[in-house]
Image: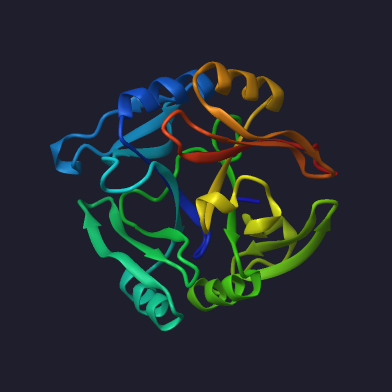
Amino acid sequence: MLDPSFVTGAPNWIDLGTPDVDAATTFYNGLFGWDLVPGGPETGGYGMYQLRGRTVAGVMTVPEEQGKPSWSVYFQTPDAEATARTVEQAGGTAAFPPMDVLDYGRMGGFTDGAGAYFGVWQPGTNTGLGMIMEPGAFIWSELYTPDVPAAAAFFHTVFGWQTDAMSFPSGAYTIVRPADGESGDSAFGGIVPIDSVPGQAEAGPHWLPYFAVEDTDATVATAERLGGRATTAATDVPEVGRVATFTDPAGAAFAVIKPAPRQ
C-alpha cells in the first residue's frame, strides 16, 4: 500500500481544481472533516486541506472556462526535467513544464498517450502529504484507460512501475507498484479498462483518487446530503473492502473505501 516515505514513482501529492473553493471546502469539511488553510499571494491562492493538523490535499481555483473540476494525482520524481523528457519520449505530452513552487518543490503536469492527466512532484521542503492511509486521507489511486497494456508500458518507461494481474468478479485488474517494490504490499494503485466500470467512460481517461473511510454507506448518505452524487453504489470487493465512487457538487470525481481487514 502507500508508503509515507514516498519512493520514486509512488503518488506523493493530490490536489483539487474547482471553480469555487469555498463551496468545495463546505462539502469536504462535511464529508471528511477537512479544514482549509488558505494560500497567500505568493502561492497564487493555492491552499491546503488539513485533517487534525496534517495536510491531506491541495486545492486551487480553476475557472470553468479553464478546465473542468477534477482531482489530480502527482507522482514522486527526483528530477522533474528528466521525467518530462521521458514522458515525451514515451508518447505523452506536457500540460505545463516543470516549474519551481517557491522552495516547496518542483512540479510538472502531463498527459499519457491516451490523454489521462497526471502530475509529478520533486520534493523540496514539502516532501509530500502529511497523512495517508487513515480515515479521511488518500489511500489508493486508479487509472481508467482504453488500453491497459499501453498504459502499463508508458508508466513503466516513465517511472519504472511493475505490474501484477488480478481477477475480480467484475473483471481483470492490473495492480501497479514502484520500480523497487517486490510484492503486492508495495502496490499503490491499479489500471482499469475504462469501459468496464459504469460512469467512468464518460469522463474520458483519468486518474481517480480513493480516500479511506470508516463507513462507506454512511459516507454515501452524507455525500448526497451535501450535494454530491454517488456514481456507483457502495459495493463489497472481496478481500479489498467496501467501495463507492462519487462526484462532488462541482463534478470532480473521487472514490472512497473502507478497507477489508488485513489477512
In the picture, measured across the screen, residue 192 lies left or right of residue 57, that is: right
- Image coordinates of residue 60 in percent, x first then y, are 30, 39
Q: Which of 118 and 176 is in front in this view?
A: 118
Q: Is residue 261 above or below residue 123?
A: above
Q: Nearer the viewer, residue 104 or 225?
A: 225
Residue 102 % position (x, y) = 20, 51
Please report the residue visible at 53 percent of the width from the left and 75 percent of the height from the top. 154
Q: Residue at x 48, y 73 (%)?
A: 113
Residue at 18% across / 42% down in the picture? Answer: 44
Q: In this view, does 196 lie to the left or right of 125?
A: right
Q: Nearer the viewer, residue 122 or 236?
A: 236
* Quarter assignment of residue 109: bottom left
For the question of whether residue 259 can be seen, the reply is yes
Residue 261, x across and y down, in percent: 80, 37
Numbered-mark total: 0
The quarter of the picture where residue 234 lies is: top right
Q: In this view, does 225 lie to the left or right of 252?
A: right
Image quadrant holding the C terminus, namely top right
Above-or-below relation of 168 to 97: above
Of residue 215 and residue 55, the one placed in the foreground of this image is 215
